[in-house]
Image: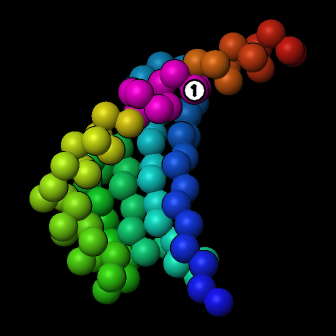
């Protein structure tokens, strides 16, 4: 069988927005085929299919919504995680 999955990831050194990177990746059979990184600001494809999707998504509304995910998805969750970790230590 074949396996397709998507991963939303927030990498951070502090809860400040500038210290957070949002990464959104599509995988197929354990191989990353396309990625959006808030540091790059666009989708990048790593396979033939991924390159085609990246081109299409970079010219559509998908790239706009992913650009806002760092603040809407990561910033909130990093703050919650950081607060929970600090109160438990």
- Badge 1 is on which residue? 77
The C terminus lies in quadrant: top right
Q: Is residue 27 above or below residue 59?
A: below
Residue sitting at x 12%, y 59%: 59
For this orientation, the residue located farthest to the right is 89
- When asked about the image quadrant of residue 36, the answer is bottom left
From the top left corner, tell me how far across and down residue 21 is, in percent.
45, 39
Which x, y percent locates residue 16? 47, 19
Residue 88 seen anywhere in this rendered image of the structure: yes
Image spot of residue 45 (x, y percent)? 33, 72
Q: Residues within 10 Å of mark 1 (few under 14, many from 20)?
A: some
Magenta span covers which residues?
A: 70-78
Of 73 and 21, which appears nearest the observer? 73
Task: Classify mark 1: helix, strand or loop.
Answer: helix
User: Which SS does the magenta portion mostly show?
Assistant: helix
Whether residue 35 is situated above or below residue 85 in the rendered picture: below
Which picture quadrant has residue 68?
A: top left
């Amino acid at each position: 069988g074949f396996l397709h999955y998507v991963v939303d990831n927030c990498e951070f050194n502090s809860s400040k927005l500038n210290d957070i990177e949002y990464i959104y990746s599509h995988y197929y059979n354990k191989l990353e085929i396309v990625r959006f990184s808030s540091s790059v600001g666009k989708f990048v494809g790593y396979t033939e299919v991924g390159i085609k999707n990246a081109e299409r998504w970079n010219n559509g509304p998908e790239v706009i919504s992913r650009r806002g995910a760092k603040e809407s998805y990561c910033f909130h969750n990093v703050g919650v995680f950081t607060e929970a970790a600090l109160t438990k230590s």
